[in-house]
Image (tube, rainbow, N blue to C red):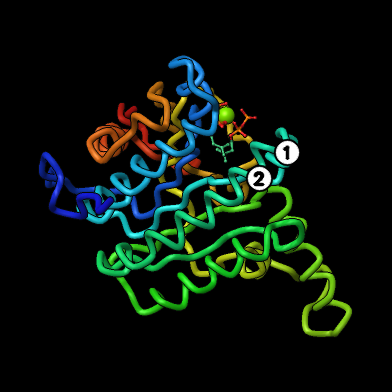
Amino acid sequence: MVLPGPGQGRSQAPQISGVPQHVAIIMDGNGRWANERGLPRTEGHRQGEIALMDTIAGAVEIGVKHLTVYAFSTENWRRSPQEVRFLMGYSRDVIRCRATELNEWGVRINWWGRRPRLWKSVINELEAAHELTADNTALDFNMAVNYGGRAEITDAVNQVAHEVEAGRLTAGHISEGAFAKRLYAPGAPDVDLLIRTGGEQRISNFLLWQCAYAEFSFNPLPWPEYNREALWDDILAFTGRERRFGGAVDKVQP
Ligand code: IPE
Ligand code: IPE
Ligand code: MG
């Protein structure tokens, strides 16, 4: 099924200033959405594909430059073997089926995550999709698959330790910037807006380093009901926030 791309939705993106550069989404609530309808959890994941494609189109339309979505966490291996198998196979198939469409939309597909344990066929699809879309510039779409914030930081620590051992870095002189260069995507900016659908209010090990000063939006909509209009609403609310980054302005003069 071909889905409506950027500019082909029911409504037009609002023309606003202050659009966040980097939006991250914890796509949660699939299982509960399905179970409430008497369907198995996997049906919720299936519906999530349509929500994802519409949200990507909406991100391109409104001018977000980086969109990172949580597809499978390093903790999701705790689920039943059937659900894990479904999620692996489904991630692989979604990337395979949608890469051409995303390429036409000008989207570059990137993978953030850990290699061990992740199905080889999923890695192959992610790498092929990246290769196909590597020259696109409309949006960097990052799929976090077998991703954990602590795993990412631990992997970077190990990388730093190797480089110290090899004499390329000096212990005691490693800056935040040098450390950040060892994360999965060194060039990506910090997250401006973190959205979690499904009603839970927690970070569940997502982008722990990159969310240091992110604004949070806990959206009660389950992921299968999310779409580009919901994204625009979350972004509109974000533009009204006052971000201080630890600074302060005295509005009353002594
Ligand atoms: C998010 O939805 C998708 C993944 C974790 C892969 P869930 O599967 O967590 O759905 P709920 O939160 O149980 O409803
Ligand atoms: C976070 O959702 C992971 C993804 C959306 C991929 P979970 O459903 O796994 O998180 P918890 O278990 O509710 O914290
Ligand atoms: Mg969940």
Residue ID at (80%, 78%): 163
Residue under numbered circle 1: 81
Task: Please say if 98 is above or below 30.
Answer: below
- Image check: 218 left or right of 78? left
**Quick one: SS at disc 1?**
helix
- Mark identifier at residue 85: 2
Q: Position of residue 225 (x, y in %)?
A: 34, 29
Q: Viewer-proximal residue, 250 or 25?
A: 25
Residue type marked 2: Arg
Residue ID at (77%, 56%): 154
The reply to whether the C-beta atoms of the residues labelled 1 and 2 are less than 8 Å apart is yes
Q: Position of residue 71 (x, y in %)?
A: 54, 46
Image quadrant where residue 179 sits? bottom right
Q: Position of residue 228 (x, y in %)?
A: 25, 41
Residue type marked 1: Pro
Image quadrant, ligand 1? top right
